[in-house]
Amino acid sequence: MRIVFASSEVFPFIKSGGLADVSMALPKALSKLGHNISIIMPKYGNISNDTFKLKEIVRNLQVPVFDEKATIYKTSLLDTEITVYMIENEFYFNRDEIYDDYDDNLERFSFFSISVLELLKYLDHSTDVIHCNDWQTAMIPAYLKILYNNDPFFKKTKTLFTIHNLGYQGIFDGSKFAKLGLEPKYFHYKYLEFYGKVNLLKAGIVFADKISTVSERYAKEIQTPEYGFGLDGVIKERSKDLYGILNGIDYDVWNPKKDPYIWKNYDINTIDNKYVNKSELQKINNLPVKDVPLIAMISRMVPQKGFDLVIEILDVLFEFEVQLIILGTGLKKYEDFFREYGAKQPEKLGVHIDFNKKKSHQLEAGADIFLMPSRYEPCGLNQMISLRYGTIPLVHETGGLADSVKDISKYEDGNGFVFSSYSPIELLKTIIRAIKTYKNKELWKKIMINGMKMDFSFDKSARKYEKLYYEMILA
């Protein structure tokens, strides 16, 4: 099959979150299955031509609707044969940030969406499936069905729209609808209108041939008022076209046996080497080097990730023999709180207000417990990474966390700790349960091994996507 993967961010070129990792790992896994995979993304100002060996292939590609032109660059994805096309427009993409709260985000990513289609036509790149990701690419299915509906070039092209996080929808003032180049009839509740505003993600849901999201559980959750963010009714109407496919991780990147960032490599047969990483992690965080449970948390500091719960329980938690290291950036109120608390409790809490690849690998390798108390989590990648590293995840029972972590108290092959009710007391009780279990070294090692045996590679996910692509093409 000829698959085009459209995404607003792709690792290693640019990254703000897990979408970038998926946009690298899934195409790699699909390519290994023998499919022709191309990636199309914006070329942001801070993507270096020299670093990534970008070659300019098209200058002044005319983009309809926006009356703008695009320059196209070409490179390859890491050490693969996957072609990556980057769409450059100085006005729209030469910015300090990828998204931010720019007033013209609707125009920026709608321009990108229609540029994808124009680029495919220019290259004469016949495509079986365009795989679109999140609201930034949601106008691709809409433009294909409306503006390019009678274009013979796209007669056999299908679209799959993947929702990575329904909490981010690309909602804009209704007055901006005219900028999309669509007839007024599409500013209607059946299409892009959403409580008087324009909702780009809704366009993807309405117009794509099929819809997927990043775990089976999340596919069910987003059809409920609690997790639907106002779109549960729209998603329910398309439930027969909705698929939940759990993301994976790239074991070429996340593998303690050959991880170049950690102090001592290890695998399931040399698991005791993990504790070399723990002691070194304690040292660089100025924590006492001793045998107490070391908890790690790597996350964007936003309410979705459960930081309010963590703040509520810290005073009581630190009455126990336990250490905590937090790595991440986000809302200023959370950053300030943990900086101040870390200064008060330097022997208990290590705080890193940044995003650092090396530190994230070292945390995964050195911690005993990985904390993910998210209120909702479409998929989550860190719990899968933690399992690979023998770091036991402690998670809220939601979305992909529920699909990948099994509580040891309920399953013989349990690989972590799970709390169901989203509350500070339930989180605290579950951490205390984990602390007590840590003292049983034999059981703790068993849980570690249960996790390390699991396969969350993208190879499994790619097989499911492959089956879905075939179903779309043959329909």
Image (cartoon, grey):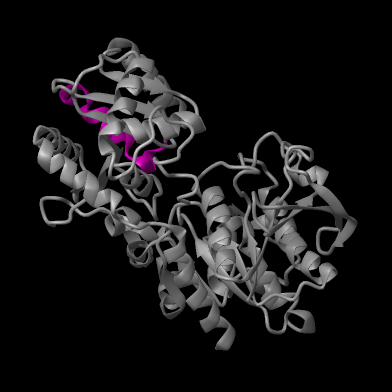
- Where does the image place residue 229, in percent across and percent down from the top left? 42, 57
**In this rendering, does residue 70 appear at all?**
yes
Q: Residue furthest bottom?
A: 475
| Camera-nearest residue between 186 and 317 | 317
Q: Name above or below for residue 94 compared with residue 63.
A: above
- Where does the image place residue 291, in percent across and percent down from the top left? 18, 23
- Where does the image place residue 308, in percent across and percent down from the top left? 30, 34
**In this rendering, does residue 199 appear at all?**
no
Which residue is depicted at the point 39% across and 55% down? 379
Left or right: 273, with 333 as reference point: left
Q: Which corner quadrant holds the N terminus?
A: bottom right
Q: Is residue 350 magenta?
A: no
Q: Is residue 307 magenta?
A: yes
Magenta-highlighted residues = 302-317
Q: Which corner quadrant holds the C terminus?
A: bottom right
Which residue is depicted at the point 34% across and 11% down? 343
Q: Residue furthest front?
A: 269
- Where does the image place residue 81, in percent across and percent down from the top left? 68, 59
| Camera-nearest residue between 451 and 420 | 451
Left or right: 184, with 378 as reference point: right
Residue 188 picture quarter: bottom right
Number of disc labels: 0
Left or right: 389, with 69 as reference point: left
Q: Residue furthest right?
A: 60
Q: Name above or below for residue 394 compared with residue 58.
A: above
Magenta highlight: main SS: helix
Which residue is depicted at the point 48% across and 51% down? 250
